Amino acid sequence: MIRSPRGTNDILPDEIAKWQYLEKAIRKVTTNYGYKEIRTPIFESTEVFSRSIGDTSDIVNKEMYTFQDRGDNSLTLRPEMTAALVRACIQNGLANRGELERLWYYGPFFRYERPQKGRFRQFHQFGAECLSSSNPESDAEVIMLAVSLIEDLGIEEYTLNINSLGNDKSRENFRRALVEYFSEYESELSEDSQRRLKENPLRILDSKDPKDKELAKKAPKIIDSLDPVSKEYFDSVLEILDYSGVSYKVSSALVRGLDYYSHTVFEFQSNALGAQDSFGGGGRYDGLFQQLGGKPTPAVGFAFGVERLLLIIESIINKNEIQDSVDYYIISGNEKYIKKSLQLAKTLRKKNYQTLTDIQQKSFKSQMKDANKRNASNVIIIAEQEMENNNILLKDMKTGEQQEVGFDEFITGLG
Ligand code: HAM
């Protein structure tokens, strides 16, 4: 048997209802916030990601699906959307003259990670990005959008961790403080982090190595390196969140694993997930447009991991809300009525009723069983005796009430 590649999932028909339930909630919240959808290719030139996420990040270093195509171009299956979205905006002149762009996206992403609960090699993200605003109101708006989705999905137990990486000057101060601190313990650091110390000391803070983690606990905090402008910016974001009733926890150790961030960074965390407890994250990335060859364009956004959101809502979702159901199930009491059933089904579907009918010449009993299994609201029985008077039997599956109605009257009654 040929199996799907490790870390990928088939989303089977029985599971699709919950995906569609989530997708509907996403469409609702993005519409309510006035965000527009953008779709870009699944693969990009490798430099889109290597120039933005950072050469020293785990994603670029270890996790990208990169390959040469037959024309010898280096391509990469997108590990995330922000860099690809910025590439698309620069290429297509979006947000080019400083106009505000509110965008969202949904789709598959690829990272070569060790698969475990909530961590896959092909996974899905829903994200939103607000381009061309350098005001704290836009940081607050994208966070509120994310929180609205969480609330709409009925998720109550989660933490929004937030921090600021400040402007370039603040990060330079921080970098110096980190180098000073970690240099003392250089020989105790993992091999990766010894390299990080030279190339990008900030990355040591999101190392997964237990010893690095221990040393990172006592490392300087970015918040102490923020210059007054950055501090004021961060306070303004928090003030708006307070005013809007959004709860958060200032988490001074949060740095995020991608290099393009400045100022606000945030992550959503849930205890329902186990080791991979972060189900969404984002932040401000004011330098990314320039890094990818565009005009300076301030921007902020976030992405949720769809599989992780689904894991959280699985236990709280109202099963009735996501159960598949049909309006009518037509049972032919006799093989000779199958054609009539199909014709009636076509009429009902044209009137926008979800309708099923037997196409396997099953027995009456099996058709009735199937109607129950498919959650039919109504069953129409086309049977010999009633057909003699051109009548059908109509059964309301909720009340169990059954009545004989004229076939033609029934059709006319549908409007
Ligand atoms: P990220 O934190 O790398 O950020 O990913 C966002 C979310 O995607 C994570 O919180 C997690 O839920 C999900 N995720 C990541 N990797 C996997 C995986 N291997 N399996 C399952 N789920 C995963 C970004 O990607 C940024 N582009 C977010 C952003 C948007 N920043 C600004 N705008």
Image (spheres, rainbow, N blue to C red):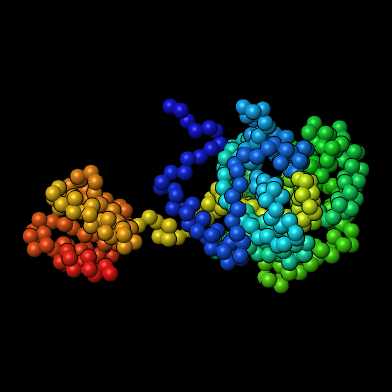
The answer to whether residue 161 of the structure is visible from this angle is: no
Residue at 85 percent of width and 60 percent of height: 230
Residue at 73 percent of width and 38 percent of height: 47
Q: Horizontally, is 356 left or right of 45 in the view?
A: left
Q: Where is residue 82 in the image (x, y as percent from the top left)?
A: 68, 49
Q: In this view, does 53 lie above or below 374?
A: above
413 vs 256, nearest the viewer: 413
The answer to whether residue 41 of the structure is visible from this angle is: yes
39 vs 319, nearest the viewer: 39
The quarter of the rendered structure image containing the C terminus is bottom left
Q: Position of residue 399 (x, y in %)?
A: 25, 67
Q: Horizontally, is 35 left or right of 193 in the view?
A: left
Q: Where is residue 157 in the image (x, y as percent from the top left)?
A: 60, 60
Q: Position of residue 67 (x, y in %)?
A: 64, 30
Q: In this view, does 176 lie above or below 99?
A: above
The quarter of the rendered structure image containing the N terminus is top left
Q: How many marks?
A: 0
Outermost residue on the bottom side: it is: 243
Residue at 50 percent of width and 40 percent of height: 9
